[in-house]
Image (spheres, grey):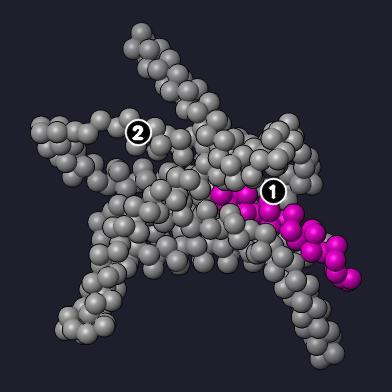
Amino acid sequence: MASGFFAILDDIAALMDDVAVTSKIATQKTAGILGDDLAVNAEKATGFLSSREIPVLMKIMKGSFINKLIIIPFVFLLEWLYSPAISFILIIGGFYLAYEGVEKIVEFLFHREKKGQEVIEESEDVVEDGEVAEKTKVKSAITTDFILSLEIVIIALASAKTGYESLKSQFDPFLVEIVTVSIVSVIATIGVYGIVALIVRMDDAGFKLIKKSNDKGVIGKLGHLLVKALPFVIKALGVVGTIALVLVAGGIFDHNIDVLHHVLPDWNEMIKHIIYGLTGGLIALILISAGKKIYTLATKKV
């Protein structure tokens, strides 16, 4: 009986050795998308009252875990039933990400600055609808996370397959792939939102350093630097997050639409992805805006 127990432990150790190899490959392959995920989620987790930043972030992280609990079995089932369908789903998700990115750019370029009474009325609406606005932003963040998580899971699965081929494993590839994708998903979620939490609490850390040092010396200066740097970091994350949305969408189009993959072969990949992302976002923006107008006209007539 004891020998059977130790045999099981040996099998688990051997499995984890195989998973360690495939997980390393998968983590390296998903590093780029994780960077984009970090920028997008950091931008979406900011803009709240200081007391609400961490609770909001926890809601988004919880949603991210739920997203992955849905995505992982769904992707493996789809891989088994009809693997080409994964590309179609990614393309649809790519249009959503591109739409979000382009909508932010259009809003920035053509946003009319409000003055006087408009500002007063808007500030009153913000106070009244703060809870609604928070729910809306959390929902938007979780939806965006779903698309990014889908790509992370699919890239991790493809990497696990590649890694498994290089191993002389005694285990079923399906088992190694499931464990690898699950581990990468957990690491990605905790890692991304852990870093986001550190970013959004920079000012609190700065105030604590100032208080602890009695606003003197290097520690005090570091505290002031953290406090002053936060607004610039948040603005930078907003810009980086928007660019990341467009780049990720363009990458999805490039790798999953065969015609586009062979267009502009001599161009820099990042430039191609920006062009594809902006084009896809503009198409999505026009279609969605037209759809909203048609819906508004239809409901008015009714």
Q: Is residue 44 above or below residue 172?
A: above
Amino acid type, mark 2? Leu
Residue 39 position in % (x across, y down): 46, 55
Quadrant location, the N terminus: bottom right
- The residue drawn where x is 34% and y is 56% is 234
As drawn, the residue found furthest toward the top would be 301
Q: Is residue 36 above or below residue 112?
A: below
Q: Is residue 294 above or below residue 8?
A: above
Q: For residue 95, which quarter of the picture?
A: top right
- The residue drawn where x is 18% and y is 45% is 127
Determine whether, in the image, residue 112 is placed left or right of residue 289. left
Residue 292 position in % (x across, y down): 42, 21
Check disc 1: other Cα within 10 Å, few if <14, some if 14-19, many if 20+.
some
Q: Is any atom of residue 251 visible in this view?
A: no
Give the residue pinned by disc 2: 109
Numbered range of the magenta stretch: 148-171
Determine whether, in the image, residue 238 is placed left or right of residue 15. left
Q: Which mark is residue 226?
A: none
- The residue drawn where x is 30% and y is 64% is 229
Check disc 2: other Cα within 10 Å, few if <14, some if 14-19, many if 20+.
few
Amino acid type, mark 1? Val
Q: Which mark is residue 75?
A: 1
Residue 81 position in % (x across, y down): 79, 42
Residue 225, magenta (yes or no): no
Cα distance, mark 1 to mark 2?
38 Å
